[in-house]
Amino acid sequence: MISDLFLQLLEKLFELLQLIQNREFDRFDEAIEPILMDMQDIHKDYLDNLTHAKEFIRAVEIDKAIEFLEIERVEWRPLRTVTQALVGQLSLNEHLNKYQRLLNAMENYFNPRSSRPAMFEIINILSSAKAKQSLQKNYYTKQIPDLIEYIDYVITELESSWENISQEYSRVFTTS
């Protein structure tokens, strides 16, 4: 399943690169809209995964939270990677300058302020908490509020980035 998805995404990337090289398009619905729809799916997946992880953490099932996030991270990696590459390529296309603010917002969604992606960072934090729990009996009890607060922070950042994309998307139609 993942390999089929990855092959389809690579085909999309190849087709898009051909279009860019030939400069045969300048239409929003051919270039940007399909990627925006993929990003919408990615955004929903991020929020769903973080919500599920919080449920595991509240139930003090840190192992399950780590396993769940690792599986989901790998499953969606091909779509995220190709979508991010496509957005980067589109933002370099001079024929799409009128959409540059939207493309910048889309690029910023994939480039969090920290140096590592949010899911990777959360998995590391949970793994660290798991290791400390083996050394300190009540470590989880003390840290669960902080873990949940961090996940809430990441959700807020993702929602803020998505709001920025939505505003720029709306601007495209009000200024055209």
Image (spheres, grey):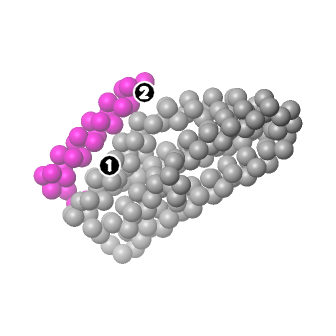
Q: Horizontal and vertical percent for residue 117?
A: 52, 47
Could you tell me if the residues under marks 2 and 1 are in contact, i.e. CB atoms within 8 Å? Answer: no
Residue 175, compared with residue 138, is above or below; it is below
The residue at the far front in this view is 135
Callout 2: 10 Å neighbours few (<14), some, many (20+)?
few
Identify the secondary structure beneath mark 2. Answer: helix
Residue 140 in the figure: left or right of residue 4: right
Badge 2 is on which residue? 2
* Residue type at the position of mark 1: Leu
Magenta part, dominant SS: helix
N-term mark: 2 or 1: 2
Q: Residue at x 46, y 52 (%)?
A: 110
The residue at the far bottom in this view is 175
Q: Which mark is residue 115?
A: none
* Residue type at the position of mark 2: Ile
**Membership of 24 in magenta stretch:** yes
Q: Residue at x 38, y 46 (%)?
A: 83
Identify the secondary structure beneath mark 1. Answer: helix
Residue 128, compared with residue 152, is above or below; it is above
Of the pair 141 and 40, the residue shown nearer to us: 141
Of the pair 33 and 9, the residue shown nearer to us: 9
Of the pair 111 and 131, the residue shown nearer to us: 131
Badge 1 is on which residue? 86
Residue 93: in sight, yes or no?
yes
Q: Horizontal and vertical percent for residue 107?
A: 41, 57
Q: Quadrant of the C terminus?
A: bottom left
Q: Which residues are magenta?
A: 1-29
Q: Quadrant of the N terminus?
A: top left
